[in-house]
Image (cartoon, rainbow, N blue to C red):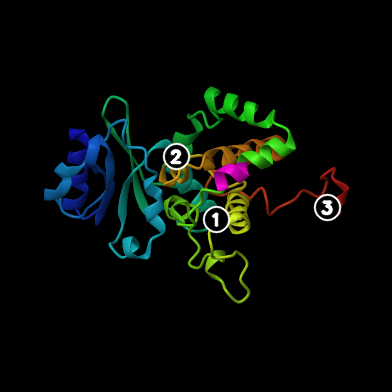
């Protein structure tokens, strides 16, 4: 942890970056995001098992971009998010400096997308064994059982949009739910509006989600949004052999096609 603090001080003192986006101690033994802008603030930085939030969510915030070049303390999910944002032309190479904290506490700076790609290539980006088992049990349900499963969960949705706020890939300046001429998604938290909102958001993330889980952690009523995203991750890989967040230059699985695609409907 001290190596991270020392690195932050060094980067800020040399003006290599103007802000270090990392974790500080939160309430109840948790961690929270912190924006360190002066060397004297570096002592607030921590990094341990409680540091799960995908801090890449802040890279698209105008108020954060105004702070200047950032160094981001990145988890594996954040690394993949950065590559996915780059693939969607939302970040340019050398826009930021990524700091990876090794298990031993050493800090590895990654200054280019190429360096991030090499780091991600060494990760296991497949679903975990537990995630696969939970997904297998879900897929074993019949169609009506699945419908009932999601109707029960979506009935609790408050339409608070915490999932959207937590997701680093929900970066549109104006969301579909905020369009009222025409109004695509009903405003009230009722069965139809809740279903349309959650399904629409999941489809917008198909082929893009990096499975960080922040949407589920942010949900105040405990909707297992991660399961919906993981099903789409599984389907996209099964049908297109594609995983998001592995390269800074990559086509989107849901917006491209191959001329030799065997499906007749695409011709």
> Does 145 sit above or below residue 21?
above
Which image quadrant: the C terminus? bottom right
> Does 61 sit above or below residue 57?
below
| Residue under the image location 61 percent in, 30 percent down | 135
Residues tagged 3 and 2 counted as in contact (Cβ below 8 A): no
Tell me if 92 is positioned left or right of 180 in this view.
left
Horizontal and vertical percent position of residue 49: 32, 30
How far apart, in angstroms, are the residues tagged by discs 3 and 2? 33 Å
| Residue under the image location 43 percent in, 55 percent down | 165
The mark nearer the N terminus, 3 or 1, is 1
Horizontal and vertical percent position of residue 146: 67, 38
Please tell me whether mark 1 sits on a helix, a strand or a loop.
loop
The residue furthest bottom is 181
Q: Is residue 64 magenta?
A: no
Q: Nearer the viewer, mark 3 or mark 1?
A: 3
The tag on residue 204 is: none
Mark 3, residue position: 266
Which image quadrant: the N terminus? top left
Residues tagged 1 and 2 counted as in contact (Cβ below 8 A): no
The mark nearer the N terminus, 1 or 2, is 2
Any part of residue 242 in sight: no
Horizontal and vertical percent position of residue 104: 28, 24
Mark 1, residue position: 88
Overall secondary structure of the magenta section: helix
Which residue occupies the foreground of this view, 150 or 41?
A: 150
Mark 2, residue position: 77
Any part of residue 253 in sight: yes
Please tell me whether mark 2 sits on a helix, a strand or a loop.
helix
- The local crowd at label 3, few if under 14, some if 14 to 19, many if 20 or more residues have their Cα within 10 Å, is few
Which residue occupies the foreground of this view, 32 or 190?
A: 190
How far apart, in angstroms, are the residues tagged by discs 3 and 1? 24 Å
Numbered range of the magenta stretch? 150-154
């Amino acid at each position: 942890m001290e190596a991270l603090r020392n690195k932050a001080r060094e980067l800020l003192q040399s003006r290599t970056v103007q802000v270090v986006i990392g974790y500080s101690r939160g309430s109840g033994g948790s961690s929270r995001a912190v924006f360190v802008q002066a060397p004297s603030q570096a002592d607030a930085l921590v990094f341990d098992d409680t540091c799960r939030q995908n801090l890449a969510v802040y890279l698209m915030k105008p108020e954060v971009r105004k702070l200047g070049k950032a160094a981001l303390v990145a988890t594996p999910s954040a690394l993949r998010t950065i590559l996915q944002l780059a693939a969607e032309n939302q970040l340019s190479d050398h826009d930021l400096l990524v700091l990876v904290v090794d298990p031993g506490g050493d800090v590895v700076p990654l200054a280019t997308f190429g360096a991030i790609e090499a780091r991600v290539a060494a990760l296991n980006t497949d679903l975990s064994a537990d995630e696969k088992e939970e997904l297998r049990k879900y897929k074993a349900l019949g169609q009506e059982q699945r419908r009932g499963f999601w109707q029960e969960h979506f009935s609790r949705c408050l339409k608070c949009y915490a999932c959207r706020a937590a997701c680093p890939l929900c970066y549109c300046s104006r969301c579909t739910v905020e369009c009222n001429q025409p109004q695509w998604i009903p405003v009230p938290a009722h069965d139809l509006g809740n279903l349309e909102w959650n399904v629409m958001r999941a489809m917008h993330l198909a082929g893009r989600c990096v499975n960080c889980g922040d949407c589920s952690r942010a949900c105040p009523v405990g909707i297992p949004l991660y399961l919906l995203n993981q099903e789409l991750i599984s389907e996209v890989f099964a049908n297109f052999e594609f995983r998001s967040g592995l390269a800074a230059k990559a086509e989107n699985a849901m917006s491209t096609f191959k001329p030799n695609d065997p499906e007749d409907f695409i011709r």
